[in-house]
Image (cartoon, rainbow, N blue to C red):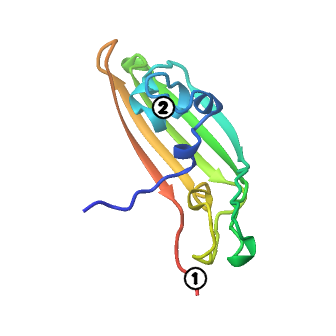
Amino acid sequence: ATPTARAGSFDLFGVTPRDIGMGGAMTGAVIGYSALFYNPAALTLDKQHSLALNLQLSVPLLDIQREDPAASPASVDPDPHLGVSFGWVKPIGGIFDDRLAFGISVSLPLKRLLRVQGVDPAAPQWYLYQSLQDKLLIHLGAAGDITDWLSIGAGLQILADLAGGAR
């Protein structure tokens, strides 16, 4: 049995502007806190503390054109999304000589944390854009250098869409 697949805005757009510019091809080229999403083992590459703040704005320009617009319900267009992300990566020095690193990132939607929506199933809609971005995303990760050329890492992604029912 497989669980329901979940996704967030990072899956659709990317974590940082650099990631978006590279089309999400970041597994081998990742730096900073976006390593928590793409490749946790890369947390040890940068030997400095890093703290980041990103503001995300997406304004979908999507349109549904039908032959007879009056024959069926109006389409449901996606709303713009505004969110903020914080990221922190800390290499551990001392006896570990910067060979261990930990990181955390939190992404919050700024427009709304709770949404109740009843959409007519006969109305065309952009399912992936409805509330995909309105989620709290938390990423935790740790990495360690085994040798100078081998690093291992583990990460945890928490998606909280706070879904429920309404009557």
Quadrant of the rendered image containing residue 77: bottom right
Q: Count residues near mark 1 (Cα–Cα under 10 Å), then give few for <14, some for 14-19, many for 20+.
A: few
Q: Which residue was labeled with disc 1?
A: 166
At 70% across and 66% down in the image, what residue appears?
Answer: 67
User: Is the residue marked by circle 2 packed among few (<14), some (14-19), or many (20+) residues within 10 Å?
Assistant: many
User: In the image, which disc is placed on residue 79?
Assistant: none
Q: Secondary structure at mark 2?
A: helix
The one of 19 and 41 positioned closer to us in this rendering: 19
The residue positioned 52% from the left and 31% from the top of the image is: 89
Q: Earlier in the sequence, mark 2 or mark 1?
A: 2
Left or right: 91 in relation to 80:
left
Assign the N terminus to one quadrant of the image: bottom left
At a point 54% along the width and 27% down the height, the residue shown is 32
Indicate the quadrant containing the C terminus: top left, top right, bottom left or bottom right: bottom right
Amino acid at pointer 2: Ala
Q: Which residue is mark 2?
A: 35
Residue 7's spot in the image, x, y percent? 49, 53
- Position of residue 60 measured from the top left corner of the image (x, y, whole percent): 70, 51
Residue 127 vs 41, above or below: the answer is below
- Residue 149, image x, y percentages: 33, 13
Please say if 75 is above or below 43.
below
